[in-house]
Image (cartoon, rainbow, N blue to C red):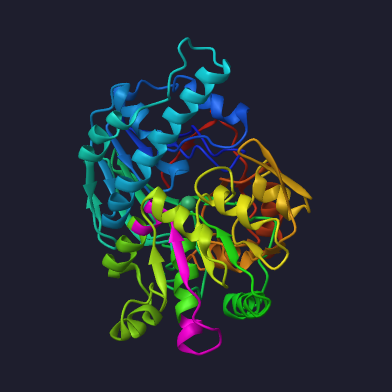
Amino acid sequence: MAKLTFLGAAGCVTGSKYLVEAARRRLLLDCGLFQGSKQLRLLNWERLPVDPSTIDWVVLTHAHIDHTGYLPRLVRDGFRGPIFATSATRDLCTILLPDSARLQEEDAENAARKGYSKHSPPLPLYTEAEVAPVLARISEFPRGAWQVISPEFSIRAHDAGHILGASSIELKIAENGKSATVLFSGDVGRYDQPILKDPAVPPAADFVLCETTYGDRDHPTGSPHDALAEIIQQVSRRGGAIIIPAFAVGRTQALLYVLRELEDWQRIPSLPVYVDSPMAISATELYQRHHEDHDLDFTRLEPNGNPLETRRMHLLRTAEESKSINKVSTPCVIISASGMATGGRVLHHLARRLPDSRNAVVLAGFQAEGTRGRALLEGAKTLHIHGEEVLVKAEVIELNQFSAHADRDELLRWLKAMPAPPRQTFLVHGEPAAREAFRSAVQTQLGWQSVTLPKLGDSIDLAPA
Ligand SMILES: [Zn+2]
């Protein structure tokens, strides 16, 4: 009988890895890195309970590092099979995985300098050189059509609307003349959002694994356009700059798209917009290339030029270009990574702009505990940046309308659209409180009783119907 084992994202939001075994063949669905607290990050150093050389295939839902960032380790430790991904996911992996490797190498260097590591000298989890063999193994497959992997396994990808290329994966397992279907939600995106299509109606399945990142919360209902327009008007009127720490993939493009629309509708002045992140610039190019993921609004805007380009946009690639905007003292928008202000070029802009009360910092994504972004949200009066205490006088504004994750209502909407209730639902990819809350929502609002909260390492039998 086929078996499913939870090797990650079971009680937390990172490290997505689900092992499916049937007829002595092994398929790994997602291969994510654990991120966040030290306790979680240490899990990346533990051996997988299964020898990577015995895994036959990997299938990816999308390119985010918490779903792909363990791949270099898997390949280094012996995995030799193909990695199936949509075309856009493959392209995004070529940007995100080398960046992840650089961060691992930086961490190891920092550990060496400060003398905290159990390795001597401290080792990176993987290096940039170890990414190329991973990229060479990625095999593209289209959405919508069945891809037969082996006599036991077939997969079909459905639009998830989360980031470019993101899919939910339907897995059909055939064994001894019987079959069972498992649906992996991947990360579910939002409905009626700019750029990306809505999450597709999910297919029928015997078993469902559903993410629960925002399983206990609903996003604000106001439009992202209204919220952003108001900020731009107010801050530009008082002569300030708007600094937006933003994730390079997804959030940056959504911000540019909405800014451009607001300009076209003449709801905001056309300010200089500085995109200060080489990775965001590369990702934006991919967003323009992969039309298969775009909704109608995007294609409608295209004849008038690039919908991801504001009128006075500047793309800053080099460090010199980045520094040059220090001299800009008139109203402008600066979009720069990292999204939670944990590192990256945005720190220089924050150090320079935070002490001026005319300026505003806009936090447009999830801010994890312990990050500078969270400290700002919680009203910190100073911020520690590059060894100095920086006074926080600028206005701090939370803008959750730009989230790339379905909220509780949207997750319920996605599940409810299934043609029939699954035999069993597994809630994954959520903090404990979010999973608990979402389980009671599924039970009371959908009437589905068999809802399980798997723990790391749990295995279950996927009995055919
Ligand atoms: Zn994601």
Place residue 275 in its image quadrant.
Answer: bottom left
Residue 227 vertical placement versus 328 (above, below): below
| Number of numbered discs | 0
Image coords of residue 446 (percent x, y) = 64, 63
Residue 166 in the image: above or below residue 118? below
The structure residue drawn at horizontal position 54% and vertical position 37%, both measured from the top left corner, is 35
Residue 439: x %, y % from top left: 67, 52
Q: Is residue 455 left or right of residue 91?
A: right
Q: What stretch of residues is rendered in magenta?
A: 261-281
Give the image quarter of residue 397.
Answer: bottom right
Q: Residue drawn at (41%, 48%), measured in percent from left and top?
A: 319
Residue 248 makes an appearance in the image = no
Furthest-bottom residue in this view:
266
Vertical arrangement, residue 198 with respect to residue 458, above or below: below
Tell whether position 164 is magenta. Answer: no
For image coordinates 61% across by 28% down, the residue present is 38
* Residue 463 horizontal/vertical position (percent): 44, 40
* Residue 275 colored in magenta in the image: yes
Q: Is residue 266 left or right of residue 128?
A: right
Report the front residue among 184 and 111: 111
> Where's residue 124, x and y in %?
42, 23
State left or right for residue 348 relative to residue 167.
Answer: right
* Looking at the image, residue 403 lies above or below residue 342: below
Residue 294 visible in the shown view: yes
Q: Residue lying furthest front in this view?
A: 327
Task: Look at 61% across and 49% down and name the residue there.
Answer: 450
The N terminus lies in quadrant: top left
